[in-house]
Image (tube, helix red, strand yellow):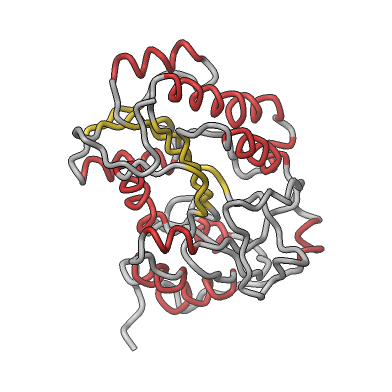
């Protein structure tokens, strides 16, 4: 097939990246420039097989990255009223890209989601027992999560795919409206639930290294441990804006102002930590990559 599960790339890296206009796709391009890695953004539509084939023929990449997908604007509630559009990209498009890559012996690094789980009796909130890579999704409360769970299950059959379960992504760019910190800092009220999250500044470079190592299969792509909304906003108050304040509300109250329920969970990141021992816990990573570089308050 032209790929091995854990082999090293034997020629210079060249990436074909889908999702140029997206947040992760844009950051990925910037990272490649900084690392002097040759890359090209795909111009084809994911659901259009011949356009993907044309991209691969023209670019001749060593790896393909999929950072394209429908998350909905301003949020996943959009998917509830745009189901066909959501299926077209998140299911048909992703599967088509995986299939085209497999035919050509290419590994596909697929930025997926970990918002396909919710705390349950065997993974209770606060227990430290996280969902593992082999666990089957138990959250289909939103149509977005439902499509993502469907496609993850189908992609298990593609031995060339590296599925990265991203959760509540955060970056050092606090002006970006997609940033989880930016989102919750602008909400009138927030729930306060510990969750696994992904610090992109630390983890996106790791995804490039995963491609270099030709890693495949499902990976919980989050920092180890959990952090709550209040803990993040307290850091925001301490590092960014001492006058910042916020209000909490319950899941029941939240349900009245959103269309679809949201996923809350802890993912077990031990597989990723074993492969990358330098991986920091979520709170350490937040301070190092997000709050220290953005610090506006006086040193205490």
Residue 192 or 239: which is nearer the viewer?
192
Residue 285 location, quadrant: bottom left
For the C terminus, the quadrant is bottom left
Q: Which quadrant of the rendered structure holds the N terminus? A: top left
Q: Is residue 104 visible?
A: yes
Q: Quadrant of residue 80?
A: top right
Tell me the residue at 37%/36% (across/down): 4
Residue 121 located left or right of residue 148: right
**Seen from this angle, which residue lies furthest bottom?**
300
Number of residue marks: 0
> Is residue 21 in view from this perspective?
no
Q: Quadrant of residue 175?
A: bottom left
Find residue 280 and report its horizontal and vertical position in percent. Answer: 39, 68
When the figure is inspected, residue 182 is found, relative to residue 23, above or below; the finding is below
In percent of width and height, residue 21 lies at 42, 33
Left or right: where does residue 154 sit relative to residue 300? right
Residue 284 position within the rendered picture, expressed as x and y whole percent measured from the top left: 40, 73
User: Which residue corresponds to the image point at 69% horizontal and 71% vertical from the top-left?
Assistant: 125
Is residue 102 placed above or below 223 in the rendered structure? above
- Front residue of 34 and 245: 34
Q: x, y (%) of residue 223?
A: 46, 63
């Amino acid at each position: 097939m032209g790929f091995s599960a854990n082999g090293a790339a034997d020629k210079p890296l060249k990436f074909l990246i889908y999702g140029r206009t997206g947040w992760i796709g844009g950051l990925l391009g910037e990272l490649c420039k900084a690392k002097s890695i040759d890359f090209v953004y795909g111009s084809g539509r994911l659901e259009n097989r011949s356009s993907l084939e044309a991209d691969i023929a023209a670019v001749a990449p060593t790896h393909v990255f999929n950072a394209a997908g429908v998350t909905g604007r301003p949020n996943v509630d959009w998917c509830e009223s745009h189901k066909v559009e959501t299926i077209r990209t998140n299911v048909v498009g992703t599967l088509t890209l995986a299939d085209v890559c497999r035919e050509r012996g290419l590994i596909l690094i697929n930025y997926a989601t970990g918002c396909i789980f919710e705390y349950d009796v065997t993974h209770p909130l606060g227990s430290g027992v996280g969902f593992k890579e082999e666990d089957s999704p138990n959250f289909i409360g939103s149509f977005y999560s439902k499509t993502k769970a469907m496609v993850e299950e189908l992609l298990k059959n593609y031995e060339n795919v590296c599925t990265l379960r991203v959760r509540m992504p955060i970056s050092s760019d606090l002006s970006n409206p997609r940033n989880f910190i930016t989102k919750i800092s602008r909400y009138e009220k927030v729930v306060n639930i510990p969750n696994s999250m992904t610090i992109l500044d630390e983890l996106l470079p790791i995804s490039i290294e995963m491609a270099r190592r030709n890693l495949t299969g499902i990976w919980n792509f989050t920092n180890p441990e959990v952090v709550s909304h209040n803990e993040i906003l307290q850091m925001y108050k301490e590092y960014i804006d001492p006058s910042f304040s916020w209000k909490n509300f319950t899941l029941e109250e939240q349900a009245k102002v959103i269309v679809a329920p949201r996923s809350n969970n802890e993912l077990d990141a031990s597989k990723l930590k074993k492969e990358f021992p330098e991986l920091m816990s979520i709170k350490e990573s937040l301070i190092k990559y997000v709050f220290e570089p953005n610090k506006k308050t006086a040193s205490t």
